[in-house]
Image (cartoon, helix red, strand yellow):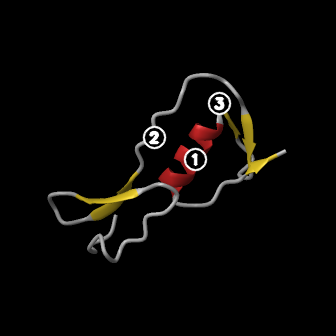
């Protein structure tokens, strides 16, 4: 969290800027992932239940995670 304005924050990968009552901004990631398994491997070396969970993690960490074969 940073003491910035949402205009200055750079939320990526589906994140939306929000601020708390103390004035700190942070990226909020709201994904509604299906529980259906269609596992994918991420470029971070982790196995995800499906692509949505991979995207959710990328948003949460604010870093790019690609699907790898």
Q: Secondary structure at mark 1?
A: helix
Front residue of 52/24: it is 52
First along the sequence among labels 3 and 2: 2
Name the image quarter holding residue 64. bottom right
- Mark 3–mark 2 distance (CA, rounded to whole Å): 14 Å
Question: Where residue 55 is drawn, which disc sits there?
Answer: 1
Q: Earlier in the sequence, mark 1 or mark 2?
A: 2
Report the front residue among 1 and 66. 66
Q: Residues within 10 Å of mark 3 (few under 14, many from 20)?
A: some
**Mark 3 or 2, which is nearer the eye?**
2
Q: Which mark is residue 16?
A: none
Q: Residue at position x 48%, y 51% from top? A: 60
Label 3 with label 2: CB-CB less than 8 Å = no
**Vertical placement of residue 27 versus 9, above or below:** above
Q: Position of residue 6 (x, y in %)?
A: 29, 70
Spot occupied by residue 32 in the image (x, y as percentages of width and height): 45, 34
Residue designated by label 2: 31
Secondary structure under badge 3?
loop
Mark 1 or mark 3: whose residue is earlier in sequence: 3
- The percent coordinates of residue 58 (x first, y second) are 57, 52
Q: Which residue position is annotated with label 3?
A: 49
Q: Are marks 1 and 2 in contact (CB under 8 Å)?
A: yes
Q: Residue at x 21, y 57 (%)?
A: 20
Q: Quadrant of the N terminus?
A: bottom left
């Amino acid at each position: 969290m940073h003491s910035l304005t949402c205009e200055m924050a750079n939320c990526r990968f589906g994140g939306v800027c929000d601020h708390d009552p103390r004035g700190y901004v942070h990226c909020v990631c709201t994904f509604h992932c299906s529980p259906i398994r269609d596992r994918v491997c991420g470029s971070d070396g982790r196995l995800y239940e499906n692509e949505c969970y991979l995207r959710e993690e990328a948003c949460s960490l604010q870093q790019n995670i690609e699907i790898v074969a």
